[in-house]
Image (spheres, rainbow, N blue to C red):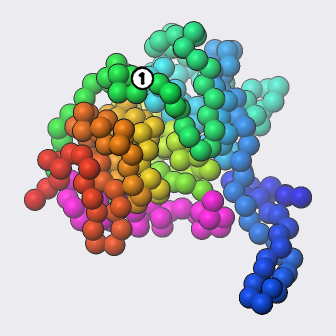
Amino acid sequence: MTVTIEPHVARAWIERVGSEGRRERVRDEVAVEEPLEIRVDGEPIAVAMRTPGEDEELAVGFLAGEALIGGRKDVASVGPTEDFAANIVELRTRNGLRRDPAGERRFSLTSACGVCGKAALEFVDRAAPPVEPGRPVEPELVLRLPSATRAAQAGFERTGGLHATGLFDADGRLLALREDVGRHNAIDKAVGALLLEGSYPLPGVIACLSGRAGFELVQKAGVAGMAGVVAVGAPSTLAVDLARERGMLLCGFVRGDSFNVYAGVERLAG
């Protein structure tokens, strides 16, 4: 039996096995995962497996990443529905979606794989212009971002089970950080938080990922117009291809005093 003590964290009885087979029954904290249906103007658009909390941010961040909305001006309202408030969030648009997803597919988002199976590079070309050249990024800033992100991961500190995305400006100031069992949900929530504040697109912003840099994460950063992505893990080939095509900085294995640059080396200072 688990007992939820806050949206991100639940407690469960577990059996802890130690040295020499010693066992003890203890209470542990576990990251929460539950489904969320996203509706737009009354129509179901997606079902996400996510960590509860920041559901409005998740909804608008996901829709922006799919180029269905272009910013705060497209959002009339967003919030839980009255019938199943904990499981459904609805966004009302001002003038409808920017494109009609009907006939393409019904989105189904697991906490593992993000949005898969699209004509990837072509979609981003249609959804957003190439990233504009901007202020050079200092290598020292790249090295600082993972530790700054890790320091703000309160949920991970307690559960060890949440991914995180931190969004930083060119000076290394943390603009938003969100955690979730799904790495793509974490970036959607972080982007959604800034979008609801009126900041979108996000030129000059760098996303720092707590894990690997898969295509879907670089795609979301590219559609948002970010300058680059920094990850403590590895990128995929498609992520590298996309970052190079978009002119984005893409750094992986950012650990200690070194990192690999897979795309956008011209964006680095020095």
The residue range painted magenta reads: 137-161
Q: Is residue 152 left or right of residue 221?
A: right
| Quarter of image, res 258 | bottom left
Percent position of residue 38, x then y: 65, 27
Percent position of residue 64, x then y: 47, 28
Give the vertical position of 208 relative to 27 (above or below). above
Percent position of residue 209, x then y: 43, 53
Q: Residue at x 44, y 44 (%)?
A: 214
- Amino acid type shown at disc 1: Ala
What main secondary structure does the magenta stretch of the protein show? Answer: helix
Percent position of residue 117, x then y: 50, 27
Secondary structure category for the residue under label 1: loop
Give the vertical position of 179 relative to 246 (above or below). below
Q: Residue at x 69, y 15 (%)?
A: 42
**Residue at the spot of label 1:** 119
| Quarter of image, res 24 | bottom right
Q: Is residue 62 left or right of residue 200?
A: right
